[in-house]
Image (tube, rainbow, N blue to C red):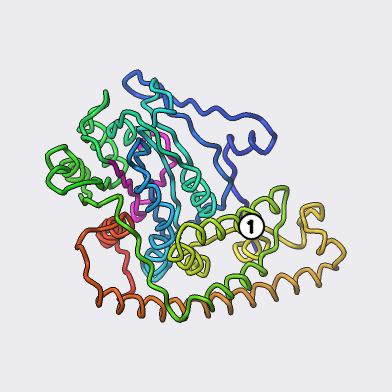
Amino acid sequence: MSFRMIRTSAAGLMVAAGMAVCVTPAVGQGLAPATAHEQPDTPQPIPGEPVVELAILLDTSNSMDGLIDQAKTRLWDIVNELATSKQAGSRPILRVGLYEYGNSRLDGKTGHIRQVLGLTTDLDAVSEQLFALNTSGGSEYCGWVIQEATQHLEWGASAGDLRMIVIAGNEPFTQGPVDYKSSLPAAIDKGIVVNTIFCGPFDEGVSTGWRDGAQLADGRYANIDQNQEMVHIPAPQDDQLRALNEQLNGTYIAYGREGAQRRARQSAQDKAAGQAAAGAELGRIAAKSSALYRNAHWDLVDAVKEETVDLDEIDEKLLPESMKKMSLDERKAYVAELASRRAGIQKQIQELDKQRRAYVDDKRREMSASGEDALDSAIIKALREAASKRGFEFEKK
């Protein structure tokens, strides 16, 4: 049996060694690069697996608190939508990247732009960074941030993969020294579809260039009310789903130098989602039952499943204390037992979540609707449209 190794970037190796990382790639037009956040090391897709790469570019200037709240509470709904998709019968791997722009706390020489996370399968890291975002007044340069994401994220190259940028904001799309009419064609040249979401009236977004931006990059234009209240509809399955999530967390085996820290982050993001909104908590629970929630970089059950760790060869120092005293056969049996238990719990969560969503959908139809999209709805519609062009199919609701 062959075992795949977890690929680590040079920046990741320096972080592991305790060195400060300063990423300063060259940027066109003589502009200084944005500052990149340290990138978590995560397993890379297996050759042949379909891949969805989604870069989310969020305006974090003043008045955008509602947009940030929607992003951090609705991330898991987007994940759950993708979890229902297949390409040629295979579930995709999801890699998410995150930028913020328009924040006055960021260096104006780099366009008030920051790469928060490069493309990663570590969804807990994405959630953690979304919850850490804060707003402050600044200048919003859409063309510039699209150029940054296009040039400096490590996009895949497979023709069948879906590569997509979603940019959301509320100022004219035309602002800044980088013309969006040059940065958008550059994205298309890399096979990246760019979707635009204007936070305000539809016609205002049209008149300020947001729709033109989407049309230039084969994308979809949408408008949302960033301050729209996220209404949660309690369902009979909620408490049982929460209980199953506790059981699910008990199936993770933290290993490696950062295993305990990553497991603590998992718990922290459970708590953060619960405090943000009940709907976010339940969406996260459902996402954790899907194949898109991958933790082979710190969880031994996933690592053995994905063949990134061989229990015959792993350094005992990387194992948790509870496993160091076990024989090899006992270790294998322990991991296999937790893997089986996890699969059973995930199946229960998926069945209950399906019942819950049907119940909530029925209740929503009974309520009067404004007809306006929220951030997750706008992204999901764009994802479905772009994914269908790449041969992805979604389960019917």
Figure quadrant of the N terminus: bottom right
Secondary element at image label 1: loop
Numbered disc total: 1
In this rendering, the answer to whether 173 lies above or below 263 is above
Q: Is residue 384 one of those drawn in magenta?
A: no
Image spot of residue 263 (x, y percent): 65, 56
Q: Name the residue type under label 1.
A: Thr
Q: Which residue is mark 1?
A: 308
Per the rendered image, the range of residues in magenta is: 150-169
Q: Is residue 153 one of those drawn in magenta?
A: yes
Figure quadrant of the C terminus: bottom left
Residue drawn at (47%, 57%), measured in percent from left and top? 276
Q: Residues within 10 Å of mark 1 (few under 14, many from 20)?
A: many
- Residue 324, quarter of the rendered image: bottom right
In this rendering, the answer to whether 139 lies above or below 315 is above
Image spot of residue 213 (x, y percent): 20, 40
In the picture provided, is 20 more to the left or to the right than 334? left
In the picture provided, is 223 more to the left or to the right than 165? left
In this rendering, the answer to whether 31 lies above or below 295 is above
Image spot of residue 249 (x, y percent): 63, 67
In the foreground, 59 or 26: 59
In the foreground, 377 or 134: 134
Residue drawn at (58%, 46%), measured in percent from left and top? 41
Most extreme residue toward the top, as rendered? Answer: 30
